[in-house]
Image (cartoon, rainbow, N blue to C red):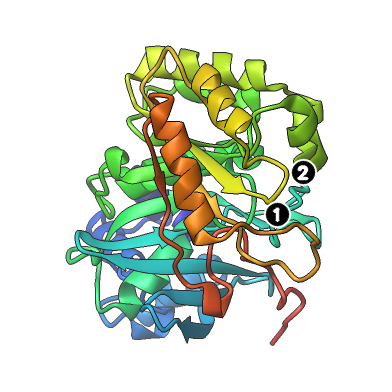
Amino acid sequence: MLTDLSFDELQIYIKNLGLPSFRADQLFDAIYSGKTLDEISNLPKGLKAIIEPSYPKYSILQALKSKDGTEKFLIRFDDGAVVECVLMKYKYGYSICLSTQVGCRMGCKFCASTLGGLARNLSSGEILGQMLLVNRHLGGSRKERKITNIVLMGSGEPLDNYDNVLKFIKLASSSKGLNISERNISLSTCGLVDKIYSLAEENLDITLTISLHATRDTDRQAIMPIANRYNLQDIVQACKYYYAKTKRKIYFEYTLIKGVNDSKDDAKRLKALTSGFLCHVNVIVLNPVSERSLQKTTRLEAYQFVELVKKEGVSATVRRTMGEDIEGACGQLRNKFLGIRN
């Protein structure tokens, strides 16, 4: 798809068609403004006919709005596959949580995204396409971007789709495209250690977020299958390496599960795991997933746990829950609409 191409690659594409270079500018602007092919008025019909098979036909199937203002979008791609992305409004602007795969194969017990397994990876252009559609939904364009921040924390494990995610980051941050600072892009992983080392070598300024969720390997293995491959010390060493290479603060996501990871001893073990590099712990109140039997803590208990963590000298806060009533909160994204076709 044309959304997979950088500006330079699109220029080559246009040149190979024997067309003048200004057509690349026109086409690139239309794509990054989220226009359909029919809405492009400055391209000749003959060129439209040539590019039609490669021009994205992504669309918003449904938009749901939470009482807190959070919006969840169902995005359909050309093959009929559907993913969800979430738009959150903050004082500093809009942040979008993007999916990187159709489904997920990681199997984390607290997450709805993995219930149906992995259908396929998204291409770099499909990850970008979610953002282009929502940016236009907000009234934005290539030159007047409305979205300020990107979180790669929707359906899928970003590092399990490494090459496409890496190219997406380059597309989104390109000065020719949406020109989003890499510092405003966060990538969340459940802990694919080998890929964390690879990411550290990419010379990016993005923020790395680790889904930690336990302070003992046995507890983590019970809720996160990836922990059977990489233990906590593997993850900590990879984080230290990433920090040493990038000097970027590491963020840890820690979903509280009653009776599993919410004790005083867990707070003390968090201190040991997070020492030696700049990091912050985001404590999350477990959001309900009807198919799972995990028990949530109260928000008050979450604040009490954070105080225990702070007393150990660890930077920590309770993350604000957004979009829970539309199943758009952390851990709730699921693909109920996979299989929708025209």
In the rendered structure, which amino acid carries the disc numbered 2?
Answer: Ile
Q: Circle 1 — which element?
A: loop
Asked whether 1 or 288 is in front, the reply is: 288
93 up-or-down from 39: above or below? above
Task: Name the quadrant containing residue 314.
Answer: top left
Task: Using a 10 Å C-alpha cutoff, classify the residue at mark 1 as few (fewer than 14 neighbours), some (14 to 19) or many (20 or more).
Answer: many
Q: Is residue 141 left or right of residue 74?
A: left
Task: Using a 10 Å C-alpha cutoff, classify the residue at mark 2 as few (fewer than 14 neighbours), some (14 to 19) or many (20 or more).
Answer: some
Which percent across, then down, holds residue 52?
51, 73
**Does label 1 or label 2 sit earlier along the sequence?**
1
Q: Which residue is mark 2?
A: 223
- Residues at badges 1 and 2 in contact (C-beta under 8 Å)? yes
Q: Which mark is residue 110?
A: 1
In the rendered structure, which amino acid carries the disc numbered 1?
Answer: Phe
Measured in 3D between alpha carbons, the distance from the residue under mark 1 to the one under mark 2, in whole angstroms, is 7 Å
**Residue at 58% across / 23% down in the picture?**
269
170 up-or-down from 290: above or below? above
